[in-house]
Image: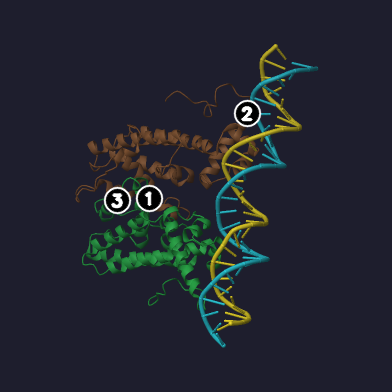
Chain colours: A green, B brown, C yellow, D cyan
Amino acid sequence: MSTEEEAVAAPPARRMRADAVRTRKALLKAAAEVFAEHGAEASTAQIAARAGIGKGTVFRHFPTKEDLFAAIISEEIDGLVTVGRRQAEQADADTALLQFMSAGVDLYANNRALAEALRMVSDVRHPEIQAGQEQLIATAESLARRAQRDGSLRADLNGQDVMLLICGVYYTAAPLLAADPSAWRRYLRLTFDGMCATGTGPLPPALVHNSLLPTVR
Amino acid sequence: MSTEEEAVAAPPARRMRADAVRTRKALLKAAAEVFAEHGAEASTAQIAARAGIGKGTVFRHFPTKEDLFAAIISEEIDGLVTVGRRQAEQADADTALLQFMSAGVDLYANNRALAEALRMVSDVRHPEIQAGQEQLIATAESLARRAQRDGSLRADLNGQDVMLLICGVYYTAAPLLAADPSAWRRYLRLTFDGMCATGTGPLPPALVHNSLLPTVR
DNA sequence: ACGCAACATGACCGAGCGGTCCGGTTAGGT
DNA sequence: ACCTAACCGGACCGCTCGGTCATGTTGCGT
């Protein structure tokens, strides 16, 4: 996980023909747009049309719609992970965490597919997305730990909590986003206040915690 | 809106035959179960099978799947409204609001369809559900106002905020609910702490507020 | 310039959906 | 006991979806 960057995710193995590269790029661009706009239920025909290619060509590049979806989403997850790592260098620990969460909610708000994919529900089959989720949680965890040490974050919050709360804030504001695209700020602020609250004792415990993460398996 | 109760929502006008009443009751029961379990995307065939009736019979009682859905959901919304009104008689204002929110999240957690329907997204077509949402917001508003007067709720929260936050807490905890059905308590507590937080100044304003509610129209 | 493997395409397939319809069944007034 | 209108059921329709395949096209090594 470091020095890649090949314009698009690695095709199987051998070099591709020039036209195929062009087609693939158009496909990925179109898929990213359509998924962001309509969510995971967007049809392959819709994507093909937007890319200006035939429906069959979609399946030439990705064996399954789900594979295409995972390729798109996991790239976007990587972007958010990068934002998180960059925030780790931010001076103020609380600000770093808050800005990471802001970036996350904002991303969700502009990408229906991402919000759906990152609900982290138990039924996320694709390993690429699963791996991305774990990276996200790890990034959030380190931001959280620093905010507990150097900032004012409650002691009993972990990385999973942070990611779940990002998702929750998005869904809280979702009904308003069409009318006011930044409506989520109101609820992120409220949530963050709750994350820093002190007076009311410890939260109910996170019983299940990482039993969902198959790291231990 | 008061003295009804006819076992099932009023069929068009005339009295029904005894067998039809039985069938309708079975249909409503099955639909409530299936929708709660599988959400709004559950198929009519599935519902008919669970009710032990033919698929055509479903459409004899409800012209559209959406009408059936709305009938089920609006009944369940009424239940939550009742809970809220009952909490208004609770001594402590903060406790009343918190218990209303607990009831709401718990209901969502046990009813996928309800959680979907109450996302209050702009595209809720059915007037029955729309009306239910407005009742819910009104109930939440009165609980909130009392908690602001007699309790410790932030001054800049309204009924819509409360309903959105209930929904948000549910979605926050949703990925954990399969493993721990009461995982939402952790996040409701955190959210409620945020709702009572004082130190950090006013929230970003709720610009759109009730422009979504066609009360003024 | 040639030939072939890589590529693109859209007709096509089967499954599942909401909704319709008509022939058979049954409740219930008389 | 009978007649009729209300009721029930499931074959059927039209549509959309993800995915396949035979056919035609094109980049590119030689």
Name the quadrant of the N terminus of chain B. Answer: top left
For the residues bearing labels 2 and 3, Cβ distance under 8 angstroms: no
Q: Mark 1 points at which residue?
A: A171
**Type of the residue with mark 1:** Tyr
Q: Disc 1 versus disc 2: distance between alpha carbons?
A: 41 Å
Neighbourhood count class around disc 1 (C-alpha, 10 Å): few under 14, some 14–19, many 20 upward: many
**Which circle marks residue A191 in the picture?**
none
Labels 2 and 3 in the same subunit: no
In the picture, measured across the screen, residue B111 lies left or right of residue A144, that is: right
Label 3 is placed on what type of residue? Answer: Ser
Q: Which amino acid does label 2 sit on?
A: Ala
Say the numbered circle drawn on residue A182.
Answer: 3
Q: Report how far apart the C-alphas of labels 2 and 3 lie in the structure.
A: 51 Å
Which one is closest to the eye, mark 1 or mark 3?
3
SS class, disc 1: helix
User: Residue at horizontal 53%, vertical 56%?
Assistant: A45
- Residue B94 lies in quadrant: top left
Contact (Cβ within 8 Å) of mark 1 with mark 2: no
Q: Mark 2 points at which residue?
A: B20
Q: What element carries label 2?
A: helix
Mark 1 and mark 3: Cα distance apart in space: 13 Å
Per the image, label 3 sits on a secondary structure element best described as: loop
Q: Can residue B115 be seen in this view?
A: yes
Along the line of sight, the residue nearer the viewer: B68 or B122: B122
Q: Where is residue B30 in the image (x, y as percent from the top left)?
A: 58, 39
**Pointer 3: residues within 10 angstroms few (<14), some, or many (20+)?**
some
